[in-house]
Image: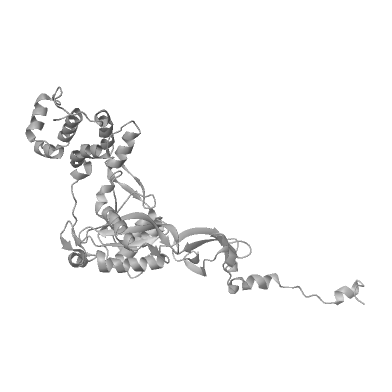
């Protein structure tokens, strides 16, 4: 027997274009039950004589409201109801929700398939695991080819713009080529904002990366992250497989070595549930359609401006590093690589190289940088002693 909330669901599904037969299947009722409800424009009036009352009855409108808000976890709903006085069992809540699950909006999403070599989807995930003997939050960027479902992931300590660029480049290198477009989420490091009519204002360095590798950048529509659902599913796959099999790591280098091994031995060899084909074999048809990698790798280093102090040093991340003394008082560009190297540029010319050091290790100094500066500092004027004899200061 239909209830008022079932009638509301029927109307909502009709507005979305569902057929009456499909609505009946989703509600677990006969199609004639739906057609009779539409004929009378409401749920049946009155209660059957032997109708069984449930402890959940008075909470059902609240449960339906949670479902409309996207909360479908029965245990979460049970806890919410108990906070409002519900004393019934979990099974009653579960049985009430179960026939409504097909109404979840995600079920109505149309799957979008791409041509070989057309698109790669980018996303980030995070998980806490043991790194070097201590629990640490690990961020991992996932890049998935839309056609073959072959994917690559790379683990890092943070998920900023530079690490996103590095992850994309490593994926290109793993695939051996570049797709025509890369679909990203709306993180500020990549997408500054959306204009009207779907125009997108991308981060300048992301456009620079796209131009270097020859792909077209694309962004998901705001609040429509499911557009890149293939990649989001891979985030869950990695959490439920790689980070379950491997739970302790010596460091990030060890973690990424295991990731590369796992990708080749397991992820690439899986039979994908949608395309019903081994991913590595399907990729063989996609790889000829990928664009060639450029001759030079894009530099993903952090880029910042620094002023050179009078003593020929610059300040970087709590320590000081030397540069040639002729740059004292001038502005330079520093590039900090993701593996901890510091390069200093005056215009387009590299003038210094350092390895980043902790404050306890002391300043980073190259003696040749300050040779001219010390020569100038220790220069002493020479005078003839006869000058002092004339004033009676020498005997």
Q: Quadrant of residue 331?
A: bottom right
**Protein image colouring:** one colour
State whether residue 271 is above or below residue 36. Answer: below
Q: Which residue is drawn at 23% across and 37% down?
A: 92
Q: What is the tally of numbered marks visible in this picture?
A: 0
Q: List the single residue furthest toward the left.
A: 32
**Left or right: where 54 falls relative to 130:** left
Q: Which residue is drawn at 24% across and 54% down?
A: 230
Q: List the single residue furthest toward the top.
A: 46
Which quarter of the image is occupied by the N terminus? Answer: top left
State whether residue 125 is above or below residue 384. Answer: above
State whether residue 31 is above or below residue 319. Answer: above
Q: Residue at x 44, y 66 (%)?
A: 339
Image location of residue 121, percent across then percent down:
27, 56
Near-viewer residue (26 or 361): 26
Which quarter of the image is occupied by the C terminus? Answer: bottom right
Q: Which residue is drawn at 30% across and 42% down?
A: 75
Image location of residue 371, percent across then percent down:
62, 73
Near-viewer residue (346 or 265): 265
Image location of residue 191, percent across then percent down:
35, 50
**Residue 289 appears in view:** yes
Near-viewer residue (51 or 319): 51
Near-viewer residue (267 or 225): 267
**Residue 291 appears in view:** no
Q: In which quarter of the image is residue 338?
A: bottom left
Q: Quadrant of residue 367?
A: bottom right
Image location of residue 62, percent across then percent down:
28, 31
């Amino acid at each position: 027997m239909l209830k008022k909330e079932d009638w509301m669901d029927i109307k909502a599904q009709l507005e979305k274009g569902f057929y009456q037969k499909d609505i009946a299947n989703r509600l677990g009722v006969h199609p004639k039950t739906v057609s009779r409800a539409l004929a009378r424009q409401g749920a049946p009036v009155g209660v059957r004589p032997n109708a069984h009352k449930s402890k959940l009855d008075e909470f059902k409108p609240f449960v339906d409201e949670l479902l409309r808000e996207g909360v479908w976890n029965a245990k979460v709903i049970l806890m919410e109801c108990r906070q409002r006085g519900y004393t019934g069992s979990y099974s009653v809540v579960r049985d009430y929700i179960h026939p409504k699950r097909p109404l979840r909006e995600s079920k109505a999403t149309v799957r979008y398939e791409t041509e070989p070599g057309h698109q790669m989807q980018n996303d980030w995930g995070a998980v806490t695991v043991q790194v070097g003997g201590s629990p640490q939050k690990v961020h991992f960027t996932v890049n998935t080819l839309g056609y073959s479902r072959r994917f690559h992931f790379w683990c890092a300590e943070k998920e900023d713009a530079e690490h996103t660029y590095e992850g994309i480049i490593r994926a290109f290198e793993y695939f051996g080529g570049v797709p025509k477009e890369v679909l990203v989420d709306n993180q500020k490091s990549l997408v500054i904002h959306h204009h009207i009519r779907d125009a997108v204002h991308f981060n300048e360095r992301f456009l620079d990366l796209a131009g270097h590798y020859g792909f077209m950048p694309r962004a998901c529509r705001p609040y429509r992250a499911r557009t890149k659902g293939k990649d989001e599913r891979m985030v869950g796959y990695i959490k439920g497989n790689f980070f379950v099999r491997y739970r302790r790591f010596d460091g990030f280098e060890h973690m990424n070595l295991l990731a590369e091994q796992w990708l080749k031995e397991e992820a690439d060899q899986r039979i994908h549930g949608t395309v019903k084909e081994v991913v590595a074999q399907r990729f063989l048809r996609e790889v000829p359609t990928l664009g060639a990698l450029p001759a030079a790798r894009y530099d993903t280093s952090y880029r910042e401006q620094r002023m050179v102090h009078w003593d020929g040093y610059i300040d970087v991340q709590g320590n000081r590093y030397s540069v040639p003394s002729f740059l004292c008082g001038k502005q330079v560009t520093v590039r900090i690589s993701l593996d901890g190297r510091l390069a200093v540029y005056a215009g387009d010319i590299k003038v210094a190289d350092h390895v980043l050091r902790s404050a306890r290790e002391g300043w980073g100094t190259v003696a040749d940088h300050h040779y001219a500066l010390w020569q100038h500092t220790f220069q002493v004027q020479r005078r003839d002693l006869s000058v002092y004899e004339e004033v009676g200061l020498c005997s």
